[in-house]
């Protein structure tokens, strides 16, 4: 069988084209130091690289979420420790006020101090995190958890709980709504029946 000159030329051109393509691919690999630069280089390897890349991105996000959770829980822990200290101080004042020998002038001074303690408690319940989000307002974190007008304290947040994923199968809660910890504020209509946190504090304050 005779092979025409045209066929020989076409085969040669095709071979040169393939070599040029390979040379171009090698140059790209040398410049990027990567064997696979496009999916067409190696479809199977490209799919595996994509899986690894996505897995790495998820793990990086989980690490970031873990750090965020640690920070949020640290803020909450500090706030609750401060609140516990204020409660101890308020209890001491209440015990002193119950002493029958306490003068009216001292009682008035104690009431002023207790009022300040109560205001500090509300301020702690309105603690924010590093991003300025209210820790105890549930998922309504852009609004102060509690408002205080006179001796009326009202919860302004919601009952939602914020959480973050720290692995593919696990989420961790990073907040607890103030309604769960401190209640919904004091019951102005029936203060004697109010056994909530702020209800008890306001009742002590009013007794002084």
Image (spheres, rainbow, N blue to C red):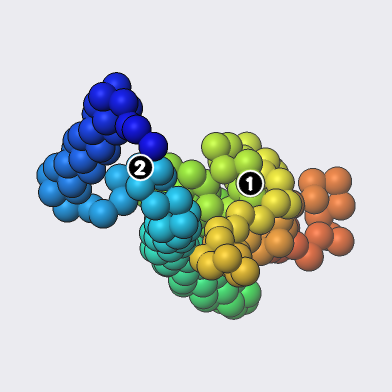
The mark closer to the camera, 2 or 1, is 2
User: Is residue 127 depicted above or below 169 in this figure?
Assistant: above
Number of residues whose C-alpha sits closer than 10 Å to that of mark 1, classed few (under 14), some (14–19) or many (20 or more): many
Nearer to the camera, 13 or 139: 13
- Residue 208 is situated, as x and y percent measured from the top left of the image, at 62, 60
User: Is residue 58 depicted above or below 128 in this figure?
Assistant: below
Number of residues whose C-alpha sits closer than 10 Å to that of mark 2, classed few (under 14), some (14–19) or many (20 or more): few
Q: Which residue is mark 2?
A: 38
Do the CB atoms of the residues marked 2 and 1 lie less than 8 Å apart?
no
Secondary element under disc 2, as helix, strand or loop, is loop
Residue at figure coordinates x 61%, y 54% from the top left: 162
Nearer to the camera, 112 or 71: 71
Residue at figure coordinates x 57%, y 43% from the top left: 141
Which mark identifies residue 55?
A: none
Q: Which residue is mark 1?
A: 139
Residue at figure coordinates x 39%, y 52% from the top left: 42
Nearer to the camera, 110 or 164: 164
Q: Residue furthest top?
A: 6
Q: Is residue 133 visible?
A: yes
Corner quadrant of residue 21: top left
Residue at figure coordinates x 63%, y 41% from the top left: 140
Judge from the rendering whether residue 48 lies leftward or rightward of residue 174; answer left or right. Answer: left
Nearer to the camera, 56 or 119: 56
Quadrant in the picture for the N terminus: top left
- Residue 152 is situated, as x and y percent measured from the top left of the image, at 69, 43
- Residue 89 is situated, as x and y percent measured from the top left of the image, at 48, 71
| C-alpha gap between disc 2 and disc 1 | 43 Å
Judge from the rendering whether residue 164 lies leftward or rightward of residue 128; answer left or right. Answer: right
Secondary element under disc 1, as helix, strand or loop, is loop
């Amino acid at each position: 069988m005779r092979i025409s000159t045209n066929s020989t030329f076409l085969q040669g051109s095709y071979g040169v084209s393939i070599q040029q393509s390979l040379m171009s691919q090698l140059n790209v690999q040398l410049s990027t130091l990567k064997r696979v630069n496009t999916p067409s280089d190696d479809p199977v390897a490209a799919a595996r690289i994509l899986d690894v890349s996505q897995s790495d991105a998820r793990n990086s996000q989980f690490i970031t979420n873990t750090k965020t959770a640690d920070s949020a829980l640290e803020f909450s822990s500090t706030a609750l420790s401060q609140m516990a200290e204020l409660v101890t101080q308020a209890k001491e004042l209440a015990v002193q006020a119950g002493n029958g020998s306490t003068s009216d002038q001292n009682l008035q001074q104690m009431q002023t101090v207790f009022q300040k303690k109560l205001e500090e408690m509300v301020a702690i319940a309105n603690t924010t995190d590093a991003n300025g989000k209210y820790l105890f307002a549930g998922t309504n974190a852009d609004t102060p958890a509690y408002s205080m007008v006179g001796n009326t304290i009202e919860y302004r947040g919601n009952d939602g709980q914020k959480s973050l994923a720290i692995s593919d199968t696990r989420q961790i809660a990073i907040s607890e709504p103030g309604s769960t910890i401190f209640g919904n504020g004091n019951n102005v209509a029936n203060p004697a029946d109010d056994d909530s946190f702020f209800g008890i504090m306001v009742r002590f304050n009013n007794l002084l």
